[in-house]
Image (spheres, rainbow, N blue to C red):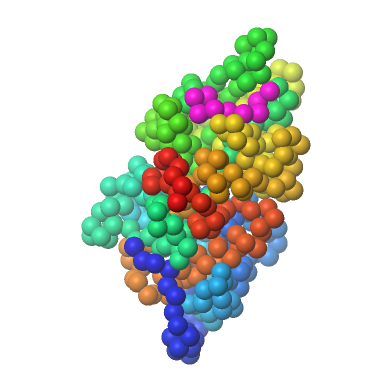
């Protein structure tokens, strides 16, 4: 693994005199939970979103950025690609799928992630991706073997932040998550979820509302489990944190989940429906919670939108609990809100949370009281050579991420690893003080 490069002033001047004016294309895939930070870092580097009319890129998995890097220093580190022109294609498809895209781009059934051009047209990349983000280590995913054997057995190369905690599993930053519920859930006692409840809910698909409200009259009212596809790092972390709190979930356990969809396939957008009744890839405006088995939403933003759009008519009133990154909650959870996990509040208010306004409980993460978080990792395609333009850009991107974390300190949704007084030695593992 290579440490984020810090070069001297002389080397920087030499590099600047030899900058290539040709545009370099870079394809980024992987974790949807960290896409907001990546988009912001690209802007910090000097790139521009195209088309400029895209007003809310944080909620989109596929975007196109282009331009010449103008930044010279970010997060106190010199930028290696200043003066270099880039076209950056993003298609965030989930942590594990990002690992698969790097390790096995030509594998059976694999296709290019859904990149888009400046005009919104589809773009295919036969090499899968140059860079991929993951909320968990590659070795934690179902593609661990492919990742270890990539590059002729050398394995995937991870780009590390200069700030990586030497006690932890490394990475570029810390990404926190939260359990969240619908407005109906909040008003009916769903304010905290324990690890045993997490395991029971997501292994069975529903649990009685009375488990949260304490009212016997709620014993026949279900609380629905709402979650991600099985290539999600947010889901992996949820399962591992639950397992390490004496629960029964692990990353190979098949979950039972629900999505806000339609009873039949006769909705207004039938082409988006998978076989059967799984109206989940686009659905936030459905009228019923539909059982989708081990399947789930393709991004945390869609979970947040589904929880926000939960029907309020008497026939379909019900609580639901999902899991999203702080960033996705802040951007897309417009109704309902985050709930406590194991008695610890992820926010700074006990009620009345407002997305984009209420401050997160950063102290609880930093001191180890709040447990639902992971290290964010950045991996390179085995074809990316050390010291190449793409490799240098990857390191610059990391510094842009770290810069952006501090730019939005008032509504911080990620952390420098050095901000934590604790660490983890494995994904979702026990929290240990430094």
Start and end of the magenta stretch?
189-198
x 62%, y 11%: residue: 219
Task: Decide which of 278, 313 is in the foreground and name it.
Answer: 313
Task: Decide which of 107, 355 is in the foreground and name it.
Answer: 355
Would residue 226 be seen by someone viewing this image from the given angle? no
Q: Is residue 327 left or right of residue 309?
A: left
x 59%, y 31%: residue: 343
Would residue 360 be seen by someone viewing this image from the given angle? yes
Q: Is residue 233 left or right of residue 1?
A: right
Q: Relative to 327, does residue 76 appear above or below in the rendering?
A: below
State which quadrant residue 112 falls in. bottom left
Q: Is residue 153 left or right of residue 104?
A: left
Residue 236 spot, x, y in % from top left: 44, 39
State which quadrant residue 194 falls in. top right
Task: Decide which of 231, 344 is in the foreground and name it.
Answer: 344
Quick check: is 191 in the magenta stretch?
A: yes
Total labels drawn: 0
Q: Quadrant of the N terminus?
A: bottom left
Residue 67 spot, x, y in % from top left: 58, 74
x 65%, y 25%: residue: 190
Please, which residue is most extreme toward the left here?
153
Quick check: is 375 in the magenta stretch?
A: no
Residue 372 spot, x, y in % from top left: 52, 40
x 65%, y 9%: residue: 216
Please, which residue is most extreme toward the front here?
434
Residue 274 spot, x, y in % from top left: 50, 34
Q: Relative to 126, does residue 95 appear above or below in the rendering?
A: above
């Amino acid at each position: 693994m290579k440490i984020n490069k810090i070069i001297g002033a002389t080397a920087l001047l030499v590099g600047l005199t030899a900058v290539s004016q040709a545009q370099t294309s870079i394809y980024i895939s992987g974790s949807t939970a960290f896409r907001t930070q990546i988009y912001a870092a690209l802007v910090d580097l000097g790139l521009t979103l195209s088309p400029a009319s895209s007003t809310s890129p944080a909620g989109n998995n596929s975007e196109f950025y282009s331009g010449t890097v103008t930044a010279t220093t970010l997060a106190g580190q010199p930028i290696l690609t200043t003066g270099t022109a880039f076209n950056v294609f993003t298609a965030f498809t989930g942590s594990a799928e990002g690992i698969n895209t790097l390790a096995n781009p030509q594998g059976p059934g694999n296709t290019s992630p859904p990149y888009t051009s400046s005009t919104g047209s589809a773009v295919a990349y036969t090499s899968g991706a140059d860079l991929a983000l993951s909320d968990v280590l590659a070795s934690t995913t179902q593609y661990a073997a492919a990742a270890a054997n990539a590059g002729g057995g050398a394995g995937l190369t991870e780009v590390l932040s200069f700030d990586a905690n030497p006690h932890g599993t490394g990475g570029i930053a810390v990404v926190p998550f939260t359990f969240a519920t619908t407005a109906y859930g909040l008003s009916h006692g769903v304010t905290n979820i324990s690890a045993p409840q997490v395991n029971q809910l997501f292994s069975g698909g529903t649990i009685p509302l009375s488990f949260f409200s304490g009212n016997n009259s709620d014993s026949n009212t279900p609380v629905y489990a709402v979650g991600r596809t099985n290539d999600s790092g947010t889901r992996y972390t949820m399962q591992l944190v639950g397992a390490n709190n004496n629960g029964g979930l692990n990353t190979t356990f098949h979950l039972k989940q629900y999505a806000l969809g339609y009873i039949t396939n006769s909705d207004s957008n039938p082409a988006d429906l998978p076989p059967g009744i799984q109206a989940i890839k686009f659905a936030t405006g459905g009228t019923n919670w539909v059982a989708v088995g081990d399947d789930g939403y393709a991004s945390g933003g869609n979970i947040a939108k589904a929880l926000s759009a939960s029907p309020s008519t008497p026939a379909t009133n019900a609580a639901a609990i999902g899991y999203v990154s702080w960033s996705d909650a802040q951007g897309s959870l417009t109704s309902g809100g985050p709930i406590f996990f194991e008695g610890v509040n992820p926010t700074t208010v006990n009620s009345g949370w407002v997305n984009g306004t209420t401050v997160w409980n950063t102290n609880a993460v930093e001191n180890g009281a709040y447990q639902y978080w992971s290290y964010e990792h950045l991996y390179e395609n085995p074809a990316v050579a050390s010291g190449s333009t793409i490799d240098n850009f990857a390191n610059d991107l990391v510094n842009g991420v770290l810069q952006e974390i501090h730019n939005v300190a008032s509504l911080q949704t990620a952390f420098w690893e050095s901000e934590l007084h604790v660490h983890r030695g494995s994904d979702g593992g026990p929290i240990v003080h430094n």
